[in-house]
Amino acid sequence: MGSSLSNLNDGTNGLAMGPGLGDIPESCVACVFMYLTPPEICNLARLSRAFRGAASSDSVWEKKLPPNYQDLLDLLPPERYHSLSKKDIFAVLSRPIPFDDDNKELWIDRVTGRVCMAISARGMAITGIEDRRYWNWMPTEESRFHVVAYLQQIWWFEVDGTVRFHLPPGIYSLSFRIHLGKFTKRLGRRVCHYEHTHGWDLKPVRFSLSTSDGQEASCEYYLEDLEREEALGKHKRGCWIEYRVGEFVVKGSEPLTEIQWSMKQIDCTHSKGGLCVDSVFINPIGDVKEYSKKKAFVK
């Protein structure tokens, strides 16, 4: 059996049973690769010389890159990507690209080739962040930005942010990454402290987003509901939770898309605290064709 597989791969065998994978023209392989994901292409590249050649073709990898990939390259020094093949450019862009004083990152998904974005708490406007009685910056390896904003106690809780970029057409979701409690490491073990954690079960936190073309979304979450969590056996304390705010659609890369978001609990009848704010994520979840089909179906 092993001999048969080997013969199939190289297109030769002693019994002259006919053509194998090695006899398929590289151009035909490249046409097939247009419909596969980058990981699938890299795996198949090991089958034969024709497959390896097609897996390095610029025409194949041009289709895997987002239509605005030059906007991402513009955030890098030219020497980082000058003279690179499209396959190597894909590899470069699949790693995080920092911008805006390293407070924001862009990258493309290794499977879909779609653009993803993360914004650090340092890249947002946080009410009272300059007053150490309320907020502190806490270094940590648990954040991709290596720092989070830790709230000790405050009455007016508000976090706002905005970003402008040529996002390619698609459907995107926006979410906050939040942690109840303060965490440290002791003797190599992760330890959480909750002496400041309070107030999140009294009133919900309101999340919202809006775009420059008039799209809006909002929702409310209780960041803590001890009775419900106890009944379900799931506790939010000590865990990073992503709170999804909503979705928005980008129909074209021109003009720039501006996204604004906020997270607030401004009922000053009670204080709240013991919360870590890490970042906001903007992730692609579909394409415009899917959105158009859903819209037509609803009609």
Image (tube, rainbow, N blue to C red):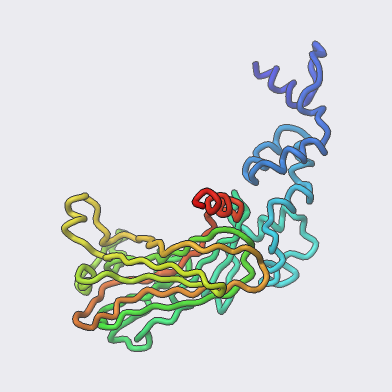
Of residues 276 and 172, which is closer to you in this image?
A: 172
Of residues 119 and 263, which is closer to you in this image?
A: 263
In this rendering, the count of numbered labels is 0
How far across and how far down the image is residue 92, in percent? 66, 60
Is 212 left or right of 139, judged from the image as shown?
right
Of residues 127 and 139, which is closer to you in this image?
A: 127
Q: Where's the N terminus, which quadrant? A: top right
Which quadrant holds residue 96?
Answer: bottom right
Name the residue at 26% across, 82% down: 154
How far across and how far down the image is residue 155, in percent? 25, 83
Which quadrant holds residue 267?
Answer: bottom left
Residue furthest to the top: 15
Task: Look at the image and tell me whether residue 28 can be seen.
Answer: yes
Residue furthest to the front: 299
Name the residue at 47% across, 77% down: 161
Q: Is residue 161 above or below residue 8?
A: below
Is 236 left or right of 50, judged from the image as shown?
left
How far across and how far down the image is residue 229, in percent? 21, 55
How far across and how far down the image is residue 285, in percent? 52, 54
Is 103 left or right of 274, judged from the image as shown?
right
Name the residue at 50% across, 77% down: 162
Name the residue at 19% across, 56% down: 228
Task: Look at the image and tell me whether residue 95 can be seen.
Answer: no
